[in-house]
Image: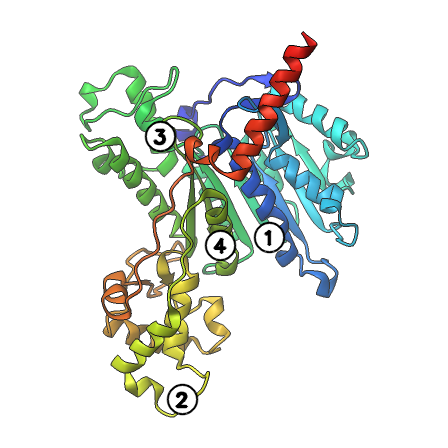
Amino acid sequence: MSDHSRWVTQLPLEFVGDAISLSGLTGTRLKCDVIRTYYPFWWRITSGGPRVGYQYNSAIVELNAAIGEVYIEDTKETLLGSAGHALNLKINHFNDQKLNTENLKIVLVEEDNDCYTHLKNVIQKRWEEVPLDMIEGSFPENTSNIYLLNDTLEDALSKIANLKLGNAIYYFDPLRSVTWDAVEKVAKSRMAKLFETRTELLIFLFTSDWFLGRNDFAALPCSPDENKWTEGEQKSVYEVDALFGDQDWRKDILCEKTVEIKEKNLLELYKQKLWRWFRYVLPMPFNPKSNQLFHVILCSNYNAGVNRTKNAFISKTLNPPFKPDINRAYTTFRFYNPKTTRGISGQRRPLVWKILRKLIKEHVDGICDRYCKDFKEDCPSPRFIQDCLEWLKTKGYLEDFPVDNAWGHELPRYRLNWETISRILKINQPSELVALSPEEFANTEMGKTLEAIKNWKQALARKQD
């Protein structure tokens, strides 16, 4: 990895017992709930499911495992973190003994010595049957399929490359951001072929810190002139250089625009980097408190999983569901394009419509190319699919998506043209995902329940005093 990594700073850590102390019902707690939902869903698919007895190799790689437990300051409760949910899936089968997790590997990497010690304590406390000596030992002698590494990210990635992981999720969950070198090292090692589907990334990004600062971390300057930067601002700029792996971002971010605009620009630029390796990039926003904003970004080449995750996030965060009137849209489409439906009656639909329908309903950001796996369900020929995509482009339903891929493959990529979709088919673009605020959460059923539990605990504590 490059020298960029030396600029990445971390936030101070606090512990309650063995759990890492964090605040925000709509931040850490909600993030952990999304992970708790996604891990078993992903594993059931990538392991082959009950049809083959879940026998396919799969792995969850927690590259910043922390402790496995989080203490939520707002409600005084200790919950499983993402690493804890990974172990719970592996060891407890989510309380379903019919699930065979034998071929699921869990790889936990934690560089910080204090966190590593707490992580071992949590494992011993919650899963005493796990042999610590074995999971910390050499890979060839480890028969548990659980691996625990107290290593730097670079050293850990080199070691993990020797494991036969099968389908794998790599979760980068640092306290602020990860270097692009680390992201690309995983992508290069795992995806030799164009948009392979066996690898997914989850990436944590504390979006607002760059523009609001925090503690001793300085907000980014509003000028690209290095002579005007303070020492703290210079360090922050170099850390974003590490995030992107270059300096191209500076002209769009180091400016006098509002914080909200710069946050959106930063996220869009980062998505463009990730789109080189992945068809689908889904940033899920979280608002832990006040003006703070972070994202967990799901990167995948498997559309169904991304769409399922987006819908789950929407349901947990009060975002409006996307429910387009597809039947009405098809009637309009048929009216404007009668040649496509000649000889087609009943419930049958032309291929161009099937593709357009999937793009509208199921593809995050409406992005596609001729090799998308869900298109093969309707037509196995990439050449015919390419013809359909070009036809949709000539009609204005699609537009070029000019993002190169990491393999140098001359593959045309397309994106929905929402102006045409809205004007002709009367389907408006899905609302942008927004974070659930603490105030909004307080009015949900879960928020009211947690507040009642909190008040009960406080009353009980006063009574005991």
What residue sits right under mark 4 in the picture?
Answer: 306
Q: Residues within 10 Å of mark 3 (few under 14, many from 20)?
A: many
Three-letter amino acid code at the position of disc 3: Ser
**Is 365 placed left or right of 454 in the picture?**
left
Could you say where residue 8 lies in the image, as x and y percent from the top left?
42, 26
Marks 2 and 3, the one that precedes in the sequence:
3
Whether residue 464 is situated above or below residue 291 in the rendered picture:
above
Q: Which residue is mark 2?
A: 344
> What type is the residue that disc 1 sits on?
Trp
Looking at the picture, does residue 121 appear above or below residue 395?
above
Percent of width and height locating residue 268: 31, 44
Label 4: how many Cα within 10 Å (few below 14, some 14–19, many 20+): many
- Judge by depth and name the residue closer to the eye, 323 or 168: 323
Q: Residues within 10 Å of mark 1 (few under 14, many from 20)?
A: many
- Give the residue at mark 1: 42
Q: Amino acid at mark 4?
A: Val
Q: Earlier in the sequence, mark 1 or mark 3?
A: 1
Tell me the SS state at disc 3.
loop
Q: Secondary structure at mark 2?
A: loop
Q: Amino acid at mark 2?
A: Ile
Give the mark toward the camera: 2 or 1: 2
Q: Which mark is residue 208?
A: 3
Viewer-side residue, 63 vs 391: 391
**Mark 1 falls on what kind of element?**
helix
Left or right of 145, for residue 186: left
